[in-house]
Image: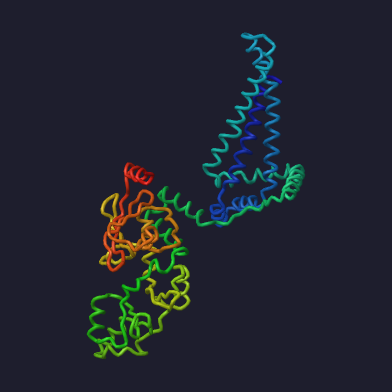
Amino acid sequence: MSLFQNIVIIAILIAGAGFLSLTEIALAGARKVKLKILAEAGDERAQKVLDLQANSADFFAASQIGLNAVAILGGILGEGAFRPYFLSFVSRFYSGQWAETISFSLSFTLVTSLFILFADLMPKRLAMIAPEKIAVSVINPIQIFIVICKPLAWIINAIANLLFRLFKVNTTRDDNITFDDISAVMDAGAQAGVLQKQEHHFIENVFELEERNVPSSMTTRENVIYFTLKETEDSIRQKLAEYPYSKFLVCNENIDEVIGYVDAKDILVRILNNQKINQLNESTIRTVLTIPDTLTLSELLDRFRSTKEKFAVVINEYALVVGVITLSDIMITVMGDWVTPMEEEQQIIKRDNNSWLIEGSTPIEDVMHALTIDEMPDQENYETLAGFMMYKLRKIPRPADTVIFGTYKFEVVDVDHFKIDQLLVTRLLEDKIEQIEDLGEN
């Protein structure tokens, strides 16, 4: 054959190999979620791609048969077509015993480079740009090619399956989606501008409900406002006016003797009807939902849904009340400042780009969000920033006590009766970190 005929045949082989490479990457990289959307919209080709992905052994066997056959044939033809011309060219400068080897090497390099560039690299990069679109476009011709290669592919697959069983290799594809997978998709969506910053934050918080315990979002014991059975009318009126809560605990004599709760609107109705409001009885006291402090926020949501309640008392293993929590508290955890009343005091106050004033009772998850910290040390041992300080210091903190973690310095600012009220958190500059490390070594 002439040089032109050889070039045409090699071009056809490169095009065939390129098509197989393009198809292989597109079918492997096509995402099931997008394919299902196309299939539900009525695109039959998308369903064919899903079916092929579910049983891909025949396709990959046929693809490898085609790619290897084309590469070998292209090498044979290319070597025979180009070697004489390279030999003639090399002979002008060198006519020794290595002339044949040099011309063969040049011919081999040329053909291999053409196949790598046009039959492998470029098709695969193109396939990664829009794998679903390409997979749907090529599914019909590739199914014909699979049928043609079926006999030989069956033999190859049988041998491969035998070897897999012999070495106990599990070939079942795991399509389970983890939180890390979803998180990665959300991060990509946020970077691409599909998700707004607050939407990304909401979705992350929803997934955190499974990990955060009830104490991280509850109103703590010392901040719970409650009525006793002997509460005076003036005291009840004063608490209703001072604390704009919709529900109040009712206790016998102290907070650990919970009887139930009253709804503020029931008391207001009694006031409007000129009835005494200090006579708390069965008509006004409702049964309160009692939950352990070990529940996650996700589990509490299930309890609220099953009991039709929106208010619960949290107790510890010693049957002592540690706080109360409402459905609104969980919503605030998810949506943050978007549903937090404006008049409510913020737990985290950003002073500047490198410092924050944070209350000791702030849940550690909120601190991590504010400071963009991925992980805290031994996080299972505490739930609040105050707990973190006590855990690291191994004592009851006092003002000016500090803890250095990563690039942050946590300093106790105010302590009230052993309770850490406020901390100053400062982001350390690199030179400060180096100084601290040098002091630690000395």
Q: Is residue 169 left or right of residue 378?
A: right
Question: What is the count of numbered marks?
Answer: 0
| Residue projecting furthest to the front | 442
Question: Which residue occupies 47% across, 64% down?
Answer: 210
Q: Nearer the viewer, residue 422 or 178?
A: 422
| Residue 340, image x, y percentages | 31, 65
Q: Is residue 125 above or below residue 284?
A: above
The answer to which image quadrant residue 403 occupies is: bottom left
Question: Which residue occupies 61% across, 42% down?
Answer: 23
The answer to which image quadrant residue 312 occupies is: bottom left
Q: How is the image coloured?
A: rainbow
Q: Is residue 120 above or below residue 406?
A: above
Q: Nearer the viewer, residue 296 or 323?
A: 323
Q: What is the quadrant of the C terminus in the image?
A: top left
Q: Nearer the viewer, residue 208 or 430?
A: 430
Q: Is residue 219 left or right of residue 133?
A: left
Q: Is residue 4 left or right of residue 330?
A: right
| Residue 105, image x, y percentages | 65, 20
| Residue 116, image x, y percentages | 60, 31
Residue 338: tell me if it is visible. no
Residue 213: tell me if it is visible. yes
Q: What is the quadrant of the N terminus in the image?
A: top right
| Residue 164, image x, y percentages | 72, 48
